[in-house]
Image (cartoon, helix red, strand yellow):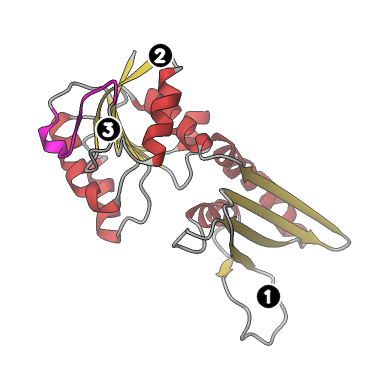
Amino acid sequence: MTRILMHGCNGRMGRMIEEIVSKDETCEIVAGIDIVDSRKTDFPYFKDIKDCNIEADVVIDFASSKAVDALLDYCMEKSLPLVLCTTGLSDEQLARVKAHSEKVAVLRSANMSLGVNLLLKALKQIAGTLAPAGFDIEIVEKHHNQKLDAPSGTAIALADSINDALNNEYEYVYDRHERRMKRPEKEIGISAVRGGSIVGEHDVIFAGTDEVITITHTAYSRAIFAKGAVEAAKFLSGKPAGLYDMSQVIG
């Protein structure tokens, strides 16, 4: 049984993870952390992580970047593996994550969806075949109108996966409205759409002469990210120190 400490237990993702874990006989949430004291739970939770004295095997974090520093300190003190799902970390925080991973297991991914991470692996092979054949590469991502950052971290991760297979020779282009030139061969265009309640949609387009291949991943619910986080927690529990990602979870 994997004992999970849920960091950000009263947020939307924390509640979703609680629901998924309640149906999983191989893991349980033994405690939660959240500054918002808004509901009753089947497990104890604390407003300050420093006050948590419940033994756990792994932490799942879906909170705020402001809380990451204290979380890292806690995991270091307790030697607790950490599934870090919070986005928008500063360069300094990312450096701390890397440093902490030398002493405790940390799993961090731009997207916790199992499907997206399988796509990241597949794109390396696809790009390695199509780009040399003259196919242009474009990525279009769509999200709800409340999302603050653009392009999405997932879109960048998709581009990075492609570029890695192409010796990192491609330039990312986010805006062409002031350009008056033909499309360079070695660029990846990344476009962002914001509207309505779109959970998340990513199209990777390989456009060649007289044929186009479009690979689409659509998230219909945030539950896919919660499911991925739970699988990551079960994978990470008991692992030695190191920086892990979802590609290792899906095998």
Question: Badge 3, how many Cα within 10 Å: few under 14, some, many 20+?
Answer: some
Question: Badge 2, how many Cα within 10 Å: few under 14, some, many 20+?
Answer: few
Task: State left or right for residue 240 relative to residue 213.
Answer: left
Q: Who's the residue at 60% across and 57% down the image?
A: 142
Q: Which mark is residue 241?
A: 3
Position of the N terminus by quadrant: top left
The answer to whether residue 179 is magenta is: no
**Do the numbered discs 2 and 1 sit on residues whose CB atoms are within 8 Å?**
no
Q: What segment is highlighted magenta in the picture? A: 41-52
Q: Who's the residue at 32% across and 23% down the image?
A: 237
- Residue type marked 3: Ala
Q: Mark 2 highlights which residue?
A: 26
* 140 in relation to 241, above or below: below
Cα gap from disc 2 to disc 1, whole angstroms: 51 Å
* 25 in relation to 103, above or below: above
Q: Mark 1 highlights which residue?
A: 184
Cα gap from disc 2 to disc 3, whole angstroms: 23 Å
- Residue type marked 1: Pro
Residue 210 in the image, given as x and y percentages of width and height? 89, 61
Task: State left or right for residue 115 relative to residue 11.
Answer: right
